[in-house]
Image: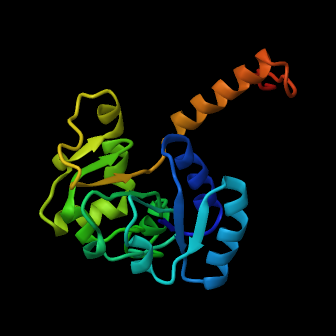
C-alpha cells in the first residue's frame, strides 16, 4: 500500500521493487485524481498491478507492506487497522526549522501512536538523528510508554547484531529520516561506474576555490 501519489511515492515504489518482489499495489491520497494519475502512470512503468484505493482503510487491508511517502503533518491511517505481519515504512521529512521558529507547534508525522504501540520492532537510520527529527517517534514513543531503548538502528538489523522478527505475526516499523552520507556514497558509486564505462562527462569533484 502506498500513501502519497507524488514524486517521493513514485521513487520509493521504484526502490522497494529492487528489494521485494511486488505484484499488486494499492495507492491512496486524499485527492482521487492523484490516486488515478499515479496508477495510470506507474503501472506501465513498473509492470505492477496498481489500483487506487477507495479509502485509507481499504489501502491498509490485505497488504504485506505499507509505505507512507507523503508531506503530511498528521497520521495518514489508523494503526488499529494494521493486520498481523505487516511492515510499515514512513518517510515524512522533518520541519524542525518551522518548529524552532514558532511557525508550527509540532513536528510532522505520518503514523499514529497505535502503530508504535503495536510494533514489535521499530527501526531508524540513526537513533541520534531520529531523536531530533522524527516527529512520529518524538511524540509517539512517550504516548505509548516506550523509550528510545526500544528503537534499533537499521545497520544493526542488516549486520545481524540485532534480532529481527521471531514470528511472522509481528508488526514492524521503519522510520526513515534519510542520511546525507548515504546519498554521497551512492553518488560516488554511480560516478565511478560512469567513469569505468566511459559514460557522461568527467568533472573535478574537489576543486580549489579561488582565493
Q: Quadrant of the C terminus?
A: top right
Q: In the image, residue 149 lies at what x, y percent?
A: 16, 46
Number of marks present in the image shown: 0
* 132 to the left or right of 85: right
Query: Which picture quadrant has residue 99?
Result: bottom left
Q: Is residue 80 visible?
A: yes
Q: In the image, residue 129 lies at what x, y percent?
A: 37, 46
Is 13 rendered above or below residue 34?
A: above
* 7 to the left or right of 83: right
Residue under the point 65% across and 26% down: 188
Is 144 rendered above or below residue 134?
A: below
Q: In the image, residue 157 lies at what x, y percent?
A: 30, 35
Residue under the point 35% across and 50% down: 130
Which color scheme did the rendering employ for the protein? rainbow
Q: In the image, residue 26 lies at what x, y percent?
A: 52, 69
Is 210 rendered above or below residue 123?
A: above
* 48 to the left or right of 2: right
Residue under the point 63% across and 59% down: 10
Query: Which picture quadrant has residue 35?
Result: bottom right
Q: Is residue 70 visible?
A: no
Residue under the point 54% across and 82% down: 30
Is 37 rendered above or below residue 161?
A: below
**Residue most toward the top?**
196
Q: Nearer the viewer, residue 33 or 141?
A: 33
**Residue most toward the left?**
145
Amino acid at each position: 500500500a502506498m500513501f502519497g501519489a507524488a514524486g517521493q511515492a513514485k521513487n520509493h515504489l521504484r526502490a522497494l521493487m529492487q528489494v521485494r518482489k511486488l505484484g499488486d499495489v494499492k495507492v491512496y491520497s486524499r485527492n482521487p485524481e492523484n490516486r488515478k494519475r499515479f496508477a495510470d502512470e506507474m503501472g506501465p512503468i513498473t509492470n505492477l498491478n496498481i489500483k487506487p484505493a477507495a479509502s485509507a482503510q481499504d489501502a491498509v487491508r490485505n497488504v504485506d507492506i505499507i509505505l507512507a511517502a507523503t508531506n503530511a503533518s498528521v497520521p495518514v491511517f489508523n494503526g488499529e487497522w494494521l493486520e498481523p505481519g505487516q511492515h510499515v515504512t514512513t518517510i515524512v521529512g522533518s520541519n524542525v526549522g518551522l518548529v524552532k521558529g514558532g511557525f508550527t507547534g509540532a513536528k510532522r508525522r505520518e503514523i499514529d501512536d497505535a502503530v508504535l504501540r503495536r510494533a514489535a520492532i521499530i527501526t531508524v537510520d540513526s537513533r541520534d538523528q531520529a531523536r531530533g527529527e522524527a516527529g512520529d517517534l518524538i511524540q509517539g514513543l512517550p504516548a505509548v510508554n516506550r523509550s528510545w531503548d526500544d528503537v534499533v538502528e537499521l545497520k544493526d538489523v542488516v549486520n545481524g547484531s540485532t534480532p529481527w522478527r521471531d514470528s511472522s505475526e509481528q508488526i514492524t516499523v521503519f522510520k526513515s529520516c534519510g542520511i546525507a552520507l548515504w546519498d554521497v556514497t551512492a553518488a560516488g558509486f554511480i560516478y565511478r561506474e560512469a567513469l569505468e564505462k566511459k559514460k557522461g562527462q568527467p568533472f573535478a569533484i574537489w576543486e580549489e576555490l579561488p582565493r
